[in-house]
Image (cartoon, rainbow, N blue to C red):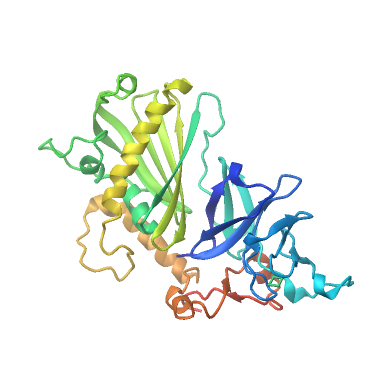
């Protein structure tokens, strides 16, 4: 797993003035919303003696540790140490890591890392979100899978024919092959569009836009755990699916799926789209959760790669580059120290001022 990316922590509407403890990258964080409506995210570990802040409450827009009542604000600064009584200056070393938060597309994204703003990878954009003529549906799923396997699956044009009953011909066409495709690379991702044969839809309403025959579709990845899929049913009608995934842990994946469509906009038809989505996601889950090894790595052996896998090869290459930048967590070391060392992901404030932090930063590979 990697630091220095944006991860979707929760849906915006679930963040309130009650602390919400969430797990990301195997570590605990706490989220809450202050009186001005701003969402905050800090490391869950209290610098005093390791209390779980997310089990406390929000007092004066700060999160209050349930153990001895220390108060931490959204910037991670400790504002009150009750046992010391009224004091002029709170010692700097009491601070905790606080992370940049952005709310977009109905989700709360947290930047889990210490890069300054201008160097951070971006959140995958949804250009059409909130614009006229587009309708949004948001779903969430939980898979027992590694995020790399999800991203590889979503970046793989050749599984569609065999995995998805609503797209592809189930291998019935003797002439089936994945056409040669061109990969479009961006600063933080890559993807491709190709032509698929669609069997149409047995659903009467969906069948009005999803007709039998060729449709233009494609997919790709962005950053570490975000993917996009576009399906153009015909020249005018289409549906785009954006996945923002959060590795709660190596084999515990929370998937937030934002579906955009520019056809059949009647809210009454949402259930038809939801059911089509649900079927497709389940078809993927059944295959992906059983892949071996469950956690691929650059040492993965026993694979024979073909040109249809080229987009996910770009993804793997990018992972290697992120590792070389020192962004891959040293999970083996963390596991050896489990229950003995409490870790926090270093925040931008820690990089700007590296001294006087109590909690140990997560080790990364190559450091
Ligand atoms: S452990 Fe948090 S206030 Fe003591
Ligand atoms: Fe799929």
What x and y, as percent, mark residue 142? 41, 50
- The quadrant holding residue 131 is top right
Asked whether residue 120 appears in the rendered view, the answer is: no
Q: Is residue 279 above or below residue 213?
A: below
In the image, 282: left or right of 336? left
Asked whether residue 288 appears in the rendered view, the answer is: yes
What x and y, as percent, mark residue 171? 15, 39
Quarter of the image where ligand 1 sits:
bottom right
In the image, 22: left or right of 306? right
Q: Residue sitting at 51 percent across and 77 percent down? A: 339
What x and y, as percent, mark residue 342? 57, 75
What x and y, as percent, mark residue 327? 50, 68
Q: Residue sitting at 40 percent across and 32 percent down? A: 274
Nearer to us in this view, 359 or 315: 359
- The quadrant holding residue 182 is top left
Nearer to us in this view, 65 or 243: 65
Q: Residue furthest left?
A: 174
Task: State which quarter of the image contains the N terminus.
Answer: bottom left
Q: Residue sitting at 71 percent across and 78 percent down? A: 356
Q: Is residue 234 above or below residue 85?
A: above
In the image, 310: left or right of 103? left
């Amino acid at each position: 797993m990697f630091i220095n990316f944006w991860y979707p922590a929760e849906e915006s509407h679930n963040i309130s003035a009650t602390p919400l403890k969430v797990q990301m990258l195997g570590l605990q964080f706490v989220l809450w919303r202050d009186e001005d409506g701003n969402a905050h995210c800090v490391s869950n570990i209290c610098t005093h003696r390791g209390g779980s802040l997310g089990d406390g409450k929000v007092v004066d827009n700060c999160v209050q540790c349930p153990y001895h009542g220390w108060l931490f604000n959204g910037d991670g600064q400790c504002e009150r140490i009750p046992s010391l009584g009224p004091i002029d200056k709170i010692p700097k070393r009491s601070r905790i890591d606080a992370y940049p938060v952005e709310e977009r597309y109905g989700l709360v994204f947290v930047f889990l890392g210490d890069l300054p703003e201008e160097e951070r990878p971006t959140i995958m954009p949804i250009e059409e979100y909130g614009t006229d003529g587009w309708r949004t549906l948001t779903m969430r799923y939980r898979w027992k899978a590694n995020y790399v396997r999800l991203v590889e699956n979503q970046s793989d044009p050749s599984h569609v024919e065999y995995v998805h009953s609503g797209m592809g011909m189930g291998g019935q066409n003797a002439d089936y092959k994945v056409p040669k495709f061109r990969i479009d690379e961006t600063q933080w991702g890559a993807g491709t569009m190709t032509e698929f044969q669609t069997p149409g839809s047995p659903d009467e309403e969906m069948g009005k836009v999803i007709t039998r025959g060729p449709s233009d579709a494609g997919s790709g990845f962005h950053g570490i755990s975000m993917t996009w899929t576009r399906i153009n049913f015909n020249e005018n009608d289409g549906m785009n699916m954006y996945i923002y995934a959060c590795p709660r842990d190596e084999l515990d994946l929370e998937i937030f799926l934002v579906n955009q469509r520019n056809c059949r906009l009647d809210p009454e038809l949402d259930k038809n789209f939801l059911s089509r989505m649900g079927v497709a996601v389940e078809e993927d889950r059944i295959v992906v959760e059983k892949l071996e090894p469950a956690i691929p790595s650059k040492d993965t052996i026993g694979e024979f790669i073909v040109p249809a896998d080229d987009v996910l090869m770009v993804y793997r290459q990018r992972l290697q580059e992120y590792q070389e930048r020192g962004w891959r967590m040293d999970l083996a070391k963390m596991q050896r120290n489990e229950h003995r060392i409490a870790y926090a992901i270093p925040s931008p404030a820690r990089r700007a001022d590296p001294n006087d932090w109590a909690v140990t930063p997560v080790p990364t590979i190559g450091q």
